[in-house]
Each structure stands twice: as C-alpha cells, then as structure tokens.
Amino acid sequence: MRLFICEKPSQARDIARVLQATRRGDGCLAGSGVTVTWCVGHLLETAPPEAYGDRYKRWILEDLPIIPERWQVVVKPKVAKQLKAIQGLLQSCAEVVIATDADREGEMIAREIIERCQYRGPIQRLWLSALDEASIRRALTALRPGEQTLPLYHCALARSRADWLIGINLSRLFTLLGRRAGFDGILPVGRVQTPTLRLVVERDRAIASFVAKPFWTVDATLEADGTRFRARWQPPVNACDDSGRCLTETVAQEAAARLEHRASAQVSSVEIEAVREGPPLPFDLGTLQEVCSAKLGLGVQETLAAAQSLYENHKATTYPRTDCGFLPESMLDDVPNVLRALAAASPALAQWLRSADPARRSRAWNTAKITAHHGIIPTAVVIDLAQLSERERAVYSLIRARYLAQLLPDHEYLKSQVLLQAGQDRLVARGKQIQVRGWKAVIDELGDSDRPEPSQPLPTLREGADIRLLGTTVSAQRTQPPKAFTEGTLVKAMKTIANQVDDPRLKQKLKDSIGIGTEATRAAIIQGLIDHGYLQKKRRSLAATAAAHTLIEAVPREVADPVLTALWEQALDRIESGQLSVDTFLAKQAAWLTQLVHNHRSLTLPLPLPAPKGPSCPVCRSAMRQRKGRTGDFWSCTRYPDCKGTNPIKMSKRSVKPK
C-alpha cells in the first residue's frame, strides 16, 4: 500500500479524489492500493522547558540558559488521535509519498512524524503548487525521490530548534529583568519579531523627531499651438536643499515677479523618450498583503486567510504562501484553459479576454527564477463568484487582474522633458503622452492601481522657439515626516530589510532569502506583536507602545538586528548542501546564547514598563486577550498555543440586560 501524507484534511480530500481513494477509514481515505492521510499542521512540537526538568517550571535567572542535551518533542493533545492513526498506517504501508506543502515547513511536518514512528521504507515527494485536478495529476506523474528534499527537513529542524533557544531563553531573561523593573507581564524576544518591532520603534522615533521645513514652489502656465501646459521654476543652487527645494520665500516671490513681467520663455532643449513598460509580476504573498492593505484596508492576516480560502476551499487560485512572482514556462500551455475558466465565471471580462494573447510571454514566464513556489494566479477551475465572500472576491479580482496583465500588450507612452529659459530663470516642463494603455487598462479598472496615472501631454516644441508665458503661481509647502507603517508596508519592510544592513555579503544573503520571516509566518508575527500589546493599530497605521520602546532599548543590538537572520540563512544553505550538520549549527547558537545571557543577567531596564491591559495569565503571568468560544467570550493567554492559560470573563451587573 502506498501512503500519501498530506498537511491538512482539505488537501487530502483533493488528492484522494484524483487517486479515487473514496473509502473512509480511521483518519484516512483509502482506495485500490493507495491510502491518503493527513496532519493538522504540526502534530508534534518541541517540548517546553519543564520537559527537561521540573525546576524549569519556575522562571529563575540562575537557570538560564536552558539548552537541551537531547531534544524532545511532544504530541499536541488535540491531534493525538490523528497521530496514532498515521502511526498505524506507517506500520503497514510499503511506500510513503510526502504530499505536504512544498517548502521547508511542509517537509518538517511529514518528516518529524516519519522519524518518530521509525518508518524505514522508501519515500517519494509530491511537489504541488495548486490543488485543482489538472495540477495534481501533473504532479503525480513527476514524483521526486525523497532524498532530494530531505535537506529541507534538516534546515527546518535547525531553524526551529535555534528559534526555540532564542525565544525561550531571551524571553525569560528579559521578562525577569522586566519584573525587576516593575513590569508584571511577558517580554517576548525572538529572532524575527524583535527586528520587526525595532523597525516600527525606529519609524515612530523618526516621526516624533521630525521637524517640518517650509519650502516654496513656483509654477508657470505656458501656451503653444493652443495647448496650455505647466512648467516648474528651478531655484538656484545657493537657495535650495539637496532635493532641489527652494528654502527662501523671498527668492521664490522674486522669481515669480520676474516671470510675471515676461511675455515668453525660450525653449533651450527638448528630450522625448519612447517607453515600453511591461506588466508587474503576478503576486507573491507579501506583495498581495501590501496591496490589499493599501487598497482594501485588510490586515495581513485577513489577506492570508482570504488567499488561503481561495486556494483550499474554492480551488480558484494557486498556493498562496509563496515568495516568488515568476511563473514556470511549462504553465504557458495552461493559459487557454485558464482564460476559458475566467470567461465562464465572469462574462464582464469579455473586453479584456478579447485583447489577451495566450502566446504573449511577459518577463513573468521564467522557469530559472522559480523558488519553491511560483506566483499566485487563477486556476482553470470555473468558479461561481457568488459563492465567494466579499473579501474573497476583492482579493481574487486583484490576483486575476495581475494574471490577465501578463497577456495584454505593453504599456507604451512618450516621456517628454522640456527646458525653458526666461531671462535668468530656468523652467522645466515634463509630460507623458500615452500611446498604448495595454495592461495598464486592466490594472486600473480591475486591479491594484488606486487611480489612473495623471499625465500632461505637451505640444510639439522645438529648440529656440518662444513660448507664450501666461502667469505664475507660488505655493508654500512643508516637508512631510516619514509615513507610519501599515501592516502591508511593514510586511514589505520585513521583505526588504536588507536595506538596513551594511555588509555587502550579508545584505545579499537577506535579499536572496527575501528578508526576515517567511511568507507563511510574517502575518502571524505582526499579529502576535499586536496581541502582546507591543504594536497598536490606529485606523490603518501601526504604532509601537511604550513597552515596545523600552524592550528595544533593553535587548542586545545583535538580537534586534536582521544580520542574525542573514547569518542563519548562510548556515542553513550549508546545511542544505551537506557542508554543515544540524548539531554543529545548534552548538554554535548555544555558545553565543550562553555568552549573551551571561553579559546581560545583571542589566537594569532603562524605564519602568507599563502594565499590560486585561488580566494576567494564571499560568505564565503573560497578558491575555479576549476570545470567542462556543459558550461565550473568555480570556486566553497571548502566548497560545505555547501557553494554554484561560480565564472566564466575569460579567458586571451593569452588563446584564433586564428581561
């Protein structure tokens, strides 16, 4: 019997349907010579500190650092029955096919079970990027040898255990130091969440310390051949800043007065450039989250949930947790089928589909640039748009527009720049004249463009011509502070955090690994910082709380620095290539951590920390948040699932409605 191990029940049902495994069993679906079973995410988790000794139940500085000699895992209680079912299937199968998500974490979910159950038979890997029937059938004909993807498990295992070392030890260390300073709550520290929090803290500080500077602009209105256009006065070097802004009002007013007394300006140069602009790549998850935050006002977790539902429940789109926007060239064969499905689902797309060319190859079609997954695109499944929620329809529309853009003509326009001289004053007029809207039309109408880009067509001008000068306008303006992060722009900053690193090799490593966190974890990291009370939402913006500022001042610079992730990624690459063992990597992390704890054990936090909102967890003393349960609302520990502490919500007399 060949056993397929999937990551979640919905995925198992889709694969079982193709394999004609329709007979229900204990935690599985069976067919002729094949059985499909499923996990529910991770069935196993790294054991908590108390598993290594009862003394670790109490948080004491003298016990730090906690470094296991032999790592242990425990079964998640809620899924113990499913693990037992898989264990029984592994004992009777002849071959295993790992069919979990095609990435490091997916590999680990299956391999940790296989290892715990001591299965020693042959293993193959099903590498899936979409759950529609055609994609599953194609992947089933191209199973990979298990040895090929085993290094992904080693990478995930090393990262998971090293994150445990940092999270457990430094969170306990700074929580205990916080209690010494009067803070009765948890101060969580982590390799990804702490640099993320630092990004927001530093942005808030930049906004708070920003001093607006006034500057002035002078715009002139000109006319040639019956066409009016605007040109901007260029201030002299001694009157402007590095950005070319005029900082002296009298200089701007005097220039405007001079221009008012002139009847014309002479064209000194004309530059015209024909520009062909290809479409943006299909979405990766981070870019989708950024656009949905800006256009739809969605949080990153809300976007991920909608994209996951489109993939799992509706089979409308491909795998969402991807860091890549490119598409394999082999998928060009699917374009006609996808277009037919889009047409059947939405007749309103007819005008775009008539213009779409299935043979067109944008830069998105590049097999060499594919990582574990390709960009998020529609599948060839005909869906009923009425069955989607309003949020799902909005997200699907964005994904669909980006895909259609790959099949439409390039956006073409003429970009013009004209320099004019009016006595001692110089003017610059810039224009854009659209020749072919191309893919811009579908993005503007159905996609992620907020509004069509404004353009100023310029008349035909020649050097030496005198152009009529009609008048001028002086505008007083002020420089603007940096914008506060939104959830979408924070995800983008996590992806592009290489910009914060000076070392060129480490900078490149962060670029190669797409920043800190993964497409699958960034949303949860941001939500965790909000739940713990370190970030707060103000409409769409995020702001760091006082506790966040204190924590970032207190933690060692190297912990809040993204360089740590870059160094880890270098090491994980070596693990994947067989040049470094998991044990050696963890030994180096343990030595570094031991020294760091020793250096900061006697640290005094710079400021008293504010008390967290709501009650404290009865188990770990962390902050709690309100959740909805089957029998009503209750308080749950913000460290869930690491801590299962709960409290009932006590109703006040005032909250009880009279009968």
Image (tube, helix red, strand yellow):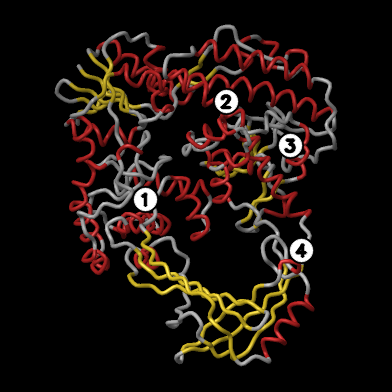
| The quadrant where residue 639 appears | top right
Counting from the top left corner in percent of width and height, residue 362 is at 30, 52
Q: Nearer the viewer, residue 274 or 457?
A: 274
Counting from the top left corner in percent of width and height, residue 601 is at 80, 20
Q: Which residue is mark 1?
A: 282
Q: Nearer the viewer, residue 262 or 628?
A: 262
Q: How many C-alpha atoms fall within 10 Å of the one at disc 2: few (<14), some, or many (≥20)?
A: some
User: Viewed as shown, does residue 544 lie left or right of 131?
Assistant: right
| Residue 247 versus residue 618 in the image, above or below | below
Residue 212 - label: 4
Is the residue under label 1 in contact with that under label 3 (CB below 8 Å)?
no
Residue type pointed to by label 4? Ala
Q: Nearer the viewer, residue 327 or 544?
A: 327
Q: Earlier in the sequence, mark 2 or mark 4?
A: 4
Q: Which residue is mark 2?
A: 567
For the residue labelled by badge 4, is the local secondary structure a helix, a strand or a loop?
loop
Q: Which residue is mark 3?
A: 552
Q: CA distance from mark 3 to mark 4?
A: 26 Å
Counting from the top left corner in percent of width and height, residue 619 is at 68, 26
Residue 322 - label: none
| Residue 486 versus residue 420 in the image, above or below | above
| Residue 249 versus residue 640 in the image, above or below | below
User: Viewed as shown, does residue 401 lie left or right of 511?
Assistant: left
Give the position of the N terminus as an image quadrant.
top left
Residue type pointed to by label 3? Ile
For the residue labelled by badge 3, is the local secondary structure a helix, a strand or a loop?
helix
Q: CA distance from mark 2 to mark 4?
A: 39 Å
Residue type pointed to by label 1? Pro
Is the residue under label 4 in contact with that under label 1 (CB below 8 Å)?
no
Q: Nearer the viewer, mark 1 or mark 4?
A: 4
